[in-house]
Amino acid sequence: MKPLVPVLTVLLLAAMLGTACTSELSGDTTSITQVAATVQAGQTAEELLTTDTPFPTDTPQPTDTPTLTPVPTATPTFTPSSTATPTHTSTPTRTSTPTRTPTQTFTPTPCLPDVSFVEDVTVPDGTNYPPGTAFTKTWRLLASGCAPWTAGSVWAFVSGDQMGAPASVPVPDTPLGSTADISVEMIAPEAPGTYKSTWQMQDPDGTPFGDQAYVMIVVPELPPRRLATGTVLHEVGSRNGEGELRIENGLDLDAVAVLSRTDGASVVAVYVLNHEGFTITGIQDGIYELYFTLGEDWDSERTRFTRRRSLSRFDDPFGFTTTATTYTAWSVTLHPVEGGTADTEPVPEDEFPDLK
């Protein structure tokens, strides 16, 4: 039965279509026979002749003939584009292309001299020195590198506190791989504090090279050394005259007054504390100059103040004359006073009297 289903369906459709299109065939026997023959299209012609098929006497008409509406099927329509037919573009694949590594070129290192610090021979770091103390710093250095130090090289001051040292000192000829001791003369500053001086080698062209080395000292804060007012520090000749000189020191600094005869026959130097006075007696007749130095912390060994030191003298000389009834007496102040008539001026170190 299953093979007849599609055949009967198609033939029924044809019969319906025939009825719908030709209404005049509804009472025609010939048409009915034709339909019946069509229905039996699956039989042979011989079978049709021998089969006794009764003719219906009345063919019922369908009251409602269904109309089969074919369901349209979508037919793809190709619409040509006005532009070029697109083509499929594949995603590119990144492919690394090996490159050839360039051959490294080596530049030879030039053969240069060098300096390596070895040790401090003198003055370890933090050594204490009183103000104005002279000392010698010595470093031990190695001639390193691959060439000896160039002739004419110097050990030069670089930075910090020079402490009275020269700008540079010559260095000895030193074979490569050997050490040399290099010394510099210095002076501790007057003011308390920590001082550092840094040095380095320089070639004859002034180009620095090698390790830097330094010296570091401490000038301690010490109680100022002072003497009693009237203490005689230095004296040349005798004081058997009649003249007198009164010295008033109204300053905050101590003073040493030096009365020196212009011919050098008599010199006397006395200490006068700040805000005190003293009278030099027994001054012989003659023309004298009066010098004075001010400062703090008197160093008796070096005969000088170590802090806030200054050197001065009075512009005009002092004359002393003795008669049977009179003698000369002067009074001076080291500090300025209103109405004062004496002027003073600074004195270079080499013009100040030697007190030793």
Image (cartoon, grey):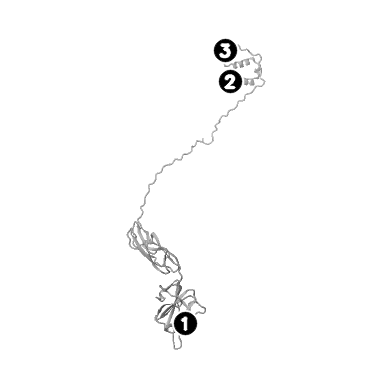
Q: Which residue is mark 2?
A: 5
Residue 307 numbered tag: none
Seen from the viewer's position, the closer of residues 129 and 158 is 129
Amino acid type of the residue that numbered disc 3 sits on in the rendered structure: Glu
Q: Is residue 73 left or right of residue 196?
A: right
**Mark-to-mark CA distance, 1 and 2:** 163 Å
The residue shown at (43%, 81%) is: 288
Residue that mark 1 sits on: 330
Dot placed on the residue nearer the N-terminal end, 1 or 3: 3
Residue 255 percent coordinates (x, y): 46, 75
| Image quadrant in which the C terminus is located | bottom left
- Mark 1 vs mark 3, CA separation in Å: 183 Å
Camera-nearest label, 3 or 2: 2
Q: Residues within 10 Å of mark 2 (few under 14, many from 20)?
A: few
Residue 181 seen in this snapshot: yes
Q: Residue at x 58, y 20 (%)?
A: 5
> What residue would you read off at disc 3?
47
